[in-house]
Image (cartoon, rainbow, N blue to C red):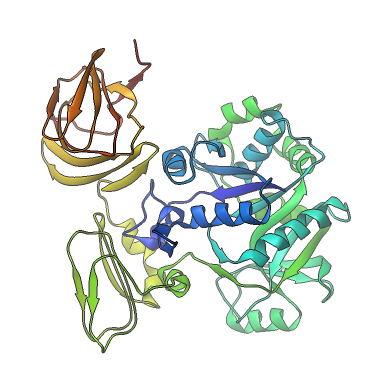
Amino acid sequence: MNIILLSGGSGKRLWPLSNDIRSKQFIKIFPTENDYESMIQRMYRQIKKVDKDAKIIIATAKTQVSAIHNQIGYDVEISVEPFRKDTFPAILLAASYMHEVQKISADEIVVVVPVDPYVEEDYFKALGKLSKQAEKGEANLTLMGIRPTYPSEKYGYIIPKSLTDISLVEAFKEKPEKTDACAFIQRGGLWNAGVFAFRIKYILDRAKVLLDYTDYDDLLQRYDSLENISFDYAIVEREPLIQVMRFAGKWKDLGTWNTLTDAMETHIIGDAITDRDCENLHIINELSIPILAMGLHDVIISASPNGILVSDKEQSSYIKPYVDEISQEIMIAEKSWGGYQVLNIEKESLTIRVDLKAGCRMSYHNHQNRDEVWIVIAGSGKTIVDGAEKPVKMGDVITMQAGCKHTVIADTGLKIIEVQIGKEIFVQDKMKFELGN
């Protein structure tokens, strides 16, 4: 299979664990043999388990590239949006990349899959069937429709022309009232899961008519000017020849705390204690202090360096407007080389704990408006400061003045306390260089 895995969005509905850099798909909540894995790790692993030769390209924003490398590795192909857009520009850019950069034939089928549903192996086998159905050429688009388990008002509905497993599509209905949702289900209506299969040629030809662009490079250069529009509105609802394939297996959209906790296999992640009177309580604690919960029913508690959420599970679905009012420094993030957590913010200083994975390094860079002090608190490695290489170990202190080029390379896992000092401390104050320059 050729798969475009959509991994965008800021995931504000899962605050405080998610932010613009660390979206919901990177939160590690699913237990594995030795640790926990995230949505994107689980999805990638499941695809490869069913089809080890699957060609996967992850469509994402540039702010999430480091987190993808951190969790998936460097072998995965990534289509990077230079500016965050909706699903139509993201899918088009990825399809164009597959054809022009990866040299995949325009006649091949590609399946577009969101990264965030909770599914099992039968879902991925169904993706293979969807791809083969699209290969038949009976329709220009082939969609997967989820058999509804209740009359949801949160999903769009696909209305098929028949009740067969494969059917032409009669209509699409956006997030209806409950009474209408019941009526759609009676007619055989299916939830729109955002899964599409089509020939690469189809989307490229349609897009060139709509956007009048020439090739991948032209598309990339003009990306900022593209309309912010979903694939459904730009393509699906304008296409007269569409098929839908029914899927009746497990499928959960993990877009809110309520649905996410339904998929969790354990009620507590992190340091937490509950009494016997707690029922249907979930706690995710990323802080190094314990949480004690007593007598709580149907509640989610989530604690991270970005904040603490205590909410009734049903009410947690309405979190977004409140989170929109919160303006703060991003306190925790995963990078390709490891990650960091902000420990303290003062008017003219910022203190961060940096964790580098063994064998990894930061970029070689400098800052114009701040000095930095590094204190090694665990592990060993080496620093390069203005071209001078020096081994470092626990207890060493490295000072760097503004304008000084520097990097650190981890031999073992390396932990550093970084203190930034200056009147103007901001993320954009960073210039990267090639080592040796």
> Does any portion of residue 148 appear in the rendered image?
yes
Looking at the image, the residue that sits furthest to the top is 437
Q: Quadrant of residue 206?
A: top right
Question: At 56% from the left edge and 45% from the top edge, which residue is drawn?
Answer: 228
Drawn side of residue 344 relative to residue 300, left or right: left
Drawn side of residue 82 relative to residue 29, left or right: right
Q: Quadrant of residue 318?
A: bottom left
Q: Residue 261, image x and y in percent?
A: 42, 72
Drawn side of residue 310 relative to residue 232, left or right: left
Q: Quadrant of residue 424?
A: top left
Q: How many marks?
A: 0
Question: At 53% from the left edge and 34% from the top edge, which residue is drawn?
Answer: 224
Q: Is residue 187 above or below residue 23?
A: below
Drawn side of residue 276 relative to residue 214, left or right: left
Q: Residue 225, image x and y in percent?
A: 56, 34
Q: Is residue 204 above or below residue 222?
A: below
> Does any portion of residue 240 appear in the rendered image?
no
Q: Residue 415, image x and y in percent?
A: 22, 39
Question: At 22% from the left edge and 37% from the top edge, which residue is drawn?
Answer: 379
Q: Quadrant of the C terminus?
A: top left
Q: Residue 192, image x and y in percent?
A: 66, 65
Question: At 21% from the left edge and 45% from the top edge, which residue is drawn?
Answer: 342
